[in-house]
Amino acid sequence: MSLTIADLKKGERAIITDCSSIDIPLKLLEMGCLPGNVVQLFQVAPFRDPIYLNINDSFVAIRKETAALILIDMINE
């Protein structure tokens, strides 16, 4: 089973491994959501959508359905 950004818990960090879905907005890719970059979950909205992330020092809020398209590998700290 592959993990996605949607599986992260608050404070967890991971490395993006794949974001090749055509449903991922180009703006998100331009902001650093690319394979090899580090992503950290900072905050989750009250109804768990959207989620607030730090992706390679860019702060973004994305919908949970978009986060489920981005594959990750967890960083064990």
Image: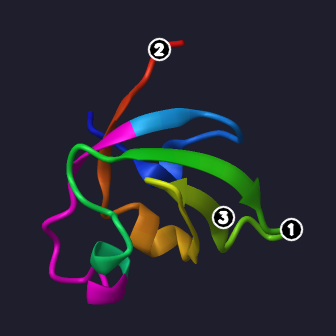
The reply to whether discs 2 and 1 touch (Cβ–Cβ < 8 Å) is no
Residue 24 coordinates in the image, percent (x, y)? 28, 79
Q: Is residue 66 left or right of residue 37?
A: right
- Three-letter residue code for mark 2: Asn
- The residue positioned 24% from the left and 59% from the top of the image is 34
- Report the span colored magenta: 15-27
Quadrant of the image containing the N terminus: top left
* Number of the label disc, if any, that sits on residue 76: 2
- The residue positioned 21% from the left and 62% from the top of the image is 19
Q: Residues within 10 Å of mark 3 (few under 14, many from 20)?
A: some
Q: Is residue 27 left or right of residue 10?
A: left
* Number of the label disc, if any, that sits on residue 46: 1
- Three-letter residue code for mark 1: Pro
Q: Is residue 61 left or right of residue 42?
A: left
- Three-letter residue code for mark 3: Tyr
From this view, report whether residue 54 is shown above or below residue 75: below
Q: Quadrant of residue 53?
A: bottom right
Q: Which residue is mark 3?
A: 52
Q: Quadrant of residue 10?
A: top right
